[in-house]
Structure formats: structure tokens, C-alpha cells
Image (cartoon, grey):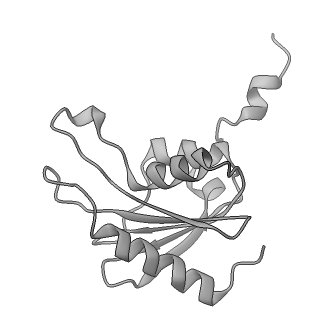
Amino acid sequence: MQLTDEMRHELVQTALEARRWAYAPYSHYAVGAALLTHSGKVYDGVNIENAAYPDGICAERVAVFKAVSEGEREFVAVAVVTANGGSPCGSCRQVLAEFGLETIVLLANGDGQLLLETSVAQLLPGAFTPQHLHSEPG
């Protein structure tokens, strides 16, 4: 599936709208994500913090887990919206890498302005992928 300018805009807008539902009472850093699958469905996600800090989860992983729980395994693009266009954390990069290094990553700010278009491979060079588990020991 080819990502069009219209699709980019729609993904960023979906992530921007989802961001309103973020639960970020500690960091006050709301994040929204929108994940486009090869089937054409879009799954959104928000960051959800917890008083026990390690128990929170990022918006990107929420979107991926929602998609995977619905049977999706192939992703085209993910849009991430933060106040300042922040990039996915290492854990999110690794989760995205599980399903394809070629997934396009769109980073936008709180005004919905697209600041960067890249790929999971560019964000996570030397990624550990499922293929590494199938290599011969030794």
C-alpha cells in the first residue's frame, strides 16, 4: 500500500484527536498515535501513565497492541503526535520493529504539523528482529 499525502494527513489528525484522551497526570506529556495497517484499518492509542511509573504504557504500543489483538500483523505507517514532535521511545521502536522495519513513522507536533517522516529501520538501526531467533546456535 502506497502512503498518500491524504493518508498522512488523516493519520496525523487521528493521532492529534486521540492525544486528547491521554492520561499523563505525572509527566504532562500527552501522546497520541495512529497506526495504519495493510488492511486499511487505523488503530489509535494514547499514553497511559501510572503512579507506579514503570507500569505506564506509550501511545504507540497501545495502538500496536490494539491492532495485533484484532489480528493485524502488517503495518504501513504510524503517526505520533506530541506537543513538540517527540520521537518514539526505545521500547516502542522495538515493538514496531517486530512487525516491520519498513513501517513509516510520522512525527507531528501539537498543531498537527508534520515535522519528520522516517522509518522504523532508521529509528532503530541494528534492530533485534524475529529472524535473529531463527539463526543457528554458536
Q: Quadrant where the N terminus lies? A: bottom right
Residue 125 visible in the displayed image: no
- Judge whether 15 appears above or below 119 on screen: below
Q: Position of residue 79 (x, y in %)?
A: 50, 69
Q: Position of residue 118 (x, y in %)?
A: 59, 68
Residue extending furthest toward the front = 70
Q: Which of 94/40 is in front? A: 40
The C terminus appears in which quarter of the rendering?
top right
Residue 76 horizontal/vertical position (percent):
68, 65
Residue at screen point 70% across, 49% down: 73
Residue at the spot 52% in from the left edge and 51% down from the top edge = 66
Q: Position of residue 5 (x, y in %)?
A: 62, 88
Q: Is residue 136 left or right of residue 121?
A: right
Residue occupying the point 61% across, 56% down: 120
Q: Residue furthest top?
A: 138
Would residue 59 be found to the left or right of residue 53 on screen? Answer: right
Question: Could you tell me how many numbered marks the image carries?
Answer: 0
Query: In the picture provided, is 50 more to the left or to the right than 61?
Result: left
In the displayed structure, 7 sits above or below 135; it is: below
Q: Is residue 42 visible?
A: yes
Q: Quadrant of residue 29?
A: bottom left
Task: Identify whether 134 is placed above or below 125.
Answer: above
Q: Residue furthest right?
A: 136
Quarter of the rendering containing residue 136: top right
Residue 80, compared with residue 50, is above or below; it is below
Residue for point 46% across, 44% down: 90
